[in-house]
């Protein structure tokens, strides 16, 4: 009789433990809920509100380059890149080389770009317009993906 009693008691304790175990899944669901918030951090393109600076994309007997290769601009300005010769050329940014926290806005300001690389411009007079809308001051080095090995690079200083 005594042995049976102990067995019954442990059975009750086990049931109690199981019942208590039902609460943690509810907590997990609550903690998981905030997760979608960071994923919804998409940034919209910020429009041009200032001056447009023109940069030519050139290739000739002396090499490949942006003319000018250094541009001083202000937040809200635009940089208009025009394909002149020996394309294709593009404009690409290395996220590790630009000021912290600016990647999402900068990339959003590049129409048709994928991960900070503009489309390739192949025909003379084709243009790519980069908006500096909502871009913070700092140095923004860029390069041409097809001619990176030939050192086709430039730098925008946002003042
Ligand atoms: Cu190029």
Image (tube, helix red, strand yellow):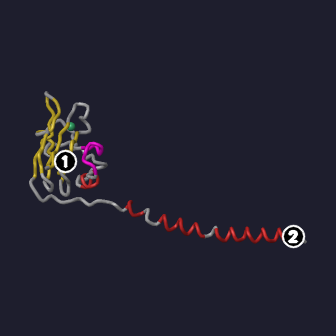
Q: Is mark 2 within 8 Å of ligand 1?
A: no
> Which element carries disc 1, helix, strand or loop?
strand
Asked whether, in this view, residue 56 is left or right of residue 14, the answer is left
- Find out whether residue 23 is within the magenta segment: no
Q: Nearer the viewer, residue 153 or 1?
A: 1
Q: Position of residue 81 (x, y in %)?
A: 15, 46
Label 2, label 1: how far apart the Cα atoms are: 79 Å
Asked whether, in this view, residue 44 is left or right of residue 62, the answer is right
Q: Nearer the viewer, residue 145 or 34?
A: 34
Dot 2 or dot 1, earlier in sequence: 2
Residue in the image at 18% along x and 60% along y: 47
Q: Which mark is residue 4?
A: 2
Q: In what quadrant does ligand 1 lie? A: top left
The answer to which quarter of the image holds residue 157 is: top left
Q: Would you place residue 143 above or below residue 76 in this image?
A: above
Q: Which residue is mark 1?
A: 138
Residue in the image at 20% along x and 54% along y: 135
Q: Nearer the viewer, residue 78 or 124?
A: 78
Asked whether, in this view, residue 31 is left or right of residue 90, the answer is right
Q: Position of residue 90 (x, y in %)?
A: 22, 43
Residue in the image at 75% along x and 72% along y: 12
Q: Which is in the foreground here, disc 2 or disc 1?
A: 2
> Which element carries disc 2, helix, strand or loop?
helix
Magenta span covers which residues? Answer: 92-100
Residue in the image at 16% along x and 47% along y: 126
The answer to which quarter of the image holds residue 35 is: bottom left
């Amino acid at each position: 009789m005594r042995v049976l009693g102990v067995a019954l008691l442990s059975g009750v304790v086990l049931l109690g433990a199981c019942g208590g175990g039902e609460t943690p899944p509810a907590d997990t669901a609550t903690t998981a809920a905030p997760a979608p918030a960071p994923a919804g951090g998409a940034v919209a393109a910020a429009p041009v509100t200032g001056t447009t600076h023109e940069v030519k994309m050139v290739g000739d007997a002396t090499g490949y380059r942006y003319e000018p290769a250094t541009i001083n601009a202000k937040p809200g300005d635009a940089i208009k890149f025009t394909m002149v010769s020996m394309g294709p050329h593009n404009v690409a940014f290395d996220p590790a080389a630009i000021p912290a926290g600016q990647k999402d806005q900068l990339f959003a300001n590049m129409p048709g770009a994928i991960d900070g690389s503009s489309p390739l411009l192949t025909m003379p007079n084709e243009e790519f317009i980069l908006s500096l809308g909502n871009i913070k001051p700092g140095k923004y080095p860029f390069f041409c993906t097809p001619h990176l090995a030939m050192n086709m690079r430039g730098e925008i200083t946002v003042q």
